[in-house]
Amino acid sequence: MTRKKRVILAVTTILCGALVLTAVRAHDVPRVATGFVSHTLCSAAFVSQVDPDEVYADTLDAMPGVGLIAWALDYRIDRETRQVTATLLGGAQSRSIYREGFGCYVAQGEDAVEDAVEAAPPPAPNEMQRAVLPEIAGDSLVAPDNPDLKLALDRAFIEPEQPPLRHTKAVVVLKDGRLVAERYAPGYGVDTPILGYSTAKSVISALIGILVRQGKLSVHEPAPVQAWQRPGDPRHAITVDQLLRHTSGLAMGSSLNASLASAWAPVNRMKYIERDMAAFAENAELATAPGSAWNYHDGNTIILSRLIRDAAGGHAADVLRFARREVFDPLGMRSVTVEFDATGTPEGSSYMLASARDWARFGQLYLDDGVGGGRRILPEGWVDYSASLTPGAWAGVGAGFWTNRGDSKGSRFRTSLGLPHDAFFASGTFGQYVIIVPSARLVVARFGFSGNQYEIAGVSKLVAEVIAATGGKRHVGADD
């Protein structure tokens, strides 16, 4: 065979393989779309208890390209059985089920998840815990105490004259550990659990940090994933640090954007079609050598979530007890719902709900260098580690948090908008933010359904205006 024929054969083989792969992934798209709709609306209806029709409309408005198939999507909410069924063209169908204490999950043909027990109630705090429990505010709504702060919050809720719209639902501001201002859209309030999407990744990072503090994990050693222990498996070299920083090299596509196009990514098959999400992620091949390239995708966090599940005891209820004991209870976070896949692994990449106040309480833990409720929760140095820039992460990502520290394209863009250089933050799709600004002793939690780069310009402006209104410093960074 001539060299020319060998080249033609190779190109033809590659093209045919790509076409087959595209066809396989296209086959997944309807169930990915219906799985996303059913799960999101199930959480809205039965956990947040907000208007699911409004959530559906706001979500579609924030997702580029989804309008092309929105006419074919339909959903039904069964409040008696606490299920949501979504269909596409009356064919592809997904069903999400709510269980008290565990939130919602996408059913994959089964009626109950593996860990079919009621969630244990949170343990009552002892007297010492009760004495030091951080109280950021009373039960009443906290209005801004000065006109500049009020104006900053007003602007965060004002819609622009032209789309994309902000759809802001909640803003909470903590200054020196006290709630100084908050505002909510109609239908939302101080106790409304709000879906944080990828802000959940930062909670997973905190739980990993606790396992490190307890000596059960080491960030720079290979992750103890059973599927990677076979001799010669190159994935054995993947470390916990690389999973936290999204440099594992696993071929799962990308989770950077929520759009119709993203439905083709294998990572979304994992989230909405696979019963055992972690097993699917662990079986992914390597696209790049571990540690050599940055690629943000939810598979990394799901693998970390399985490590937490196994270390906590192996079941969903064990994870809840561990998270409550180590993080939620000491911080006074009483509204949290962690959702799980069908095997009891927390869906820590996207599906965790808490009130805006509780999300802000979580941010305060990082503002206070990992100390909360009168004791050290995170290992010493974990906060700086989490906020340190990942080499090659052009968007400005650390270990479980996004960060303005270091020199990245994302940091330069955000600082130009007013977000201080020392800021770092939990971030979720559609504009969910828990922003920590150490130089101003400030935490700003913002939640909504925003397109257009997820309202980062508006949120950066909000933070800058809040800093000015509360007498904090601007643009004082970790490297200054």
Image: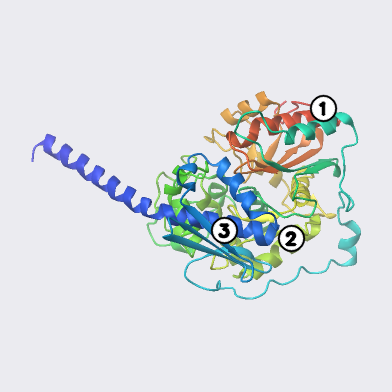
Q: What's under tag 2, amino acid-wise? A: Glu
Q: Earlier in the sequence, mark 3 or mark 2?
A: 3
Q: Secondary structure at mark 1?
A: helix
Name the mark nearer the viewer: 1 or 2: 1
Q: Is residue 456 visible?
A: yes
Identify whether 385 is placed above or below 331.
Answer: above
Residue 79, given in percent of the width and then of the height, sits at 64, 67
Residue 208's x, y, as percent? 64, 55
Q: CA distance from mark 1 to mark 2?
A: 35 Å
Number of other residues with Cα within 10 Å of mark 3, as a class: few under 14, some 14 to 19, many 20 or more: many
- Mark 3 vs 2: CB contact within 8 A: no
Helix, strand or loop at label 3? It is helix
The kind of residue tagged 3 is: His
On the rendered image, what quadrant is the N terminus found in? top left
Above or below 478: residue 48:
below
Across and down, in percent, residue 309 comes to 60, 64
Q: Residues within 10 Å of mark 1 (few under 14, many from 20)?
A: some
Q: CA distance from mark 3 to mark 2?
A: 27 Å
Residue at image coords 70%, 58%: 49
* Residue on which disc 2 sits: 326
* Alpha-carbon span between mark 3 and mark 1: 40 Å
On residue 39, the disc is: 3
Q: Amino acid at mark 1?
A: Ala
Residue under numbered circle 1: 468
For the C terminus, which image quadrant? Answer: top right
